[in-house]
Image (cartoon, rainbow, N blue to C red):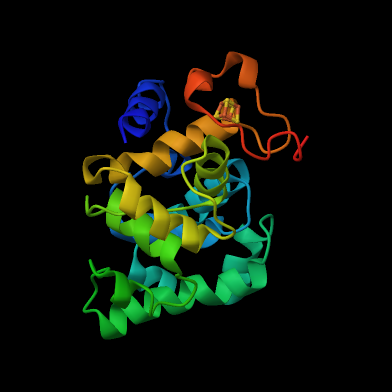
Amino acid sequence: MRSIEKVITILSQESHTTMLGRIGGKWDPFKVLISTILSARAKDEVTEGVARELLKKFPDYTSLANANPFVVKKIIHRIGFFNAKTKNVIAAAKMIRDEFEGKVPEDRELLMQIPGVGRKVANCVLVYSFGQDAIPVDIHVHRISNRLGWVKTTTPEKTEQALLTIVPQQHWQMLNDTFVHHGKTICLPLSPKCSSCPVYKYCMRRDVMKSR
Ligand code: SF4
């Protein structure tokens, strides 16, 4: 437990701002929701520009619910699964308008009723918009948690369940932001920079050689 806290403390001290922090209405639930729906299986660098452009044209649920799908598709066509995401973001806006009285719900189960919203997206909204204790597990959090030896899991869902039992609750909210930055700069998917990693001595480097 102590080494887990040590790793989080060291990595969280590094200067960073994730994609969600750069969208431009950092804690706005609608913007976080739409941005994270768009981010599935897409690079943050691309998603960021696309989300910014979409939310500039459709800044709230009313305008997006009434959006022409062809216009939305034209804006987001640079990211993967843009056809499905076009349907999902418009449907999400309509659901917020028609079923949630214009408010993004602060409840995971309700959030997961929205098209395009799985556990990761729901947890992102809870953490980044409402300051609730949750751990959004994306590919970076999943990969790094396994490499460090904290968990031995095959899916992000299993990783989340395992992390919830071993990471002290006061660190849950910062874990995603911290590991996303570390995963993009040092603990890269294919060639992690272990020799310059600030948490080298705490890491089991599980499966690192296999991924090279
Ligand atoms: S030592 Fe290597 S595998 Fe472990 S966290 Fe650092 S970069 Fe990742």
Closest to the observer, 1 or 114: 1
Measured from the top left, where is residue 16 in percent x and y? 43, 27
Give ligand 1's quarter of the image: top right
Task: Report x, y in % for residue 113.
Answer: 38, 80
On screen, residue 203 above or below 211? above
Question: Given the current orientation, which residue lies at the most extreme top position?
Answer: 196
Which one is nearer the viewer's eye here, 19 or 167? 167
Q: Quadrant of the C terminus?
A: top right
Toward which corner of the image does residue 147 lie, by quadrant? top right
**How far across and how far down the image is residue 51, in percent?**
51, 52
Residue 174 seen from this side: yes
Residue 70 relative to residue 5: left or right: right
Q: Is residue 175 above or below residue 198?
A: below
Residue at coordinates 65% horizontally, 22% vertically from top-left?
193
Q: Residue 39, how many percent across, how many down?
A: 54, 55
Q: Is residue 146 left or right of residue 209?
A: left
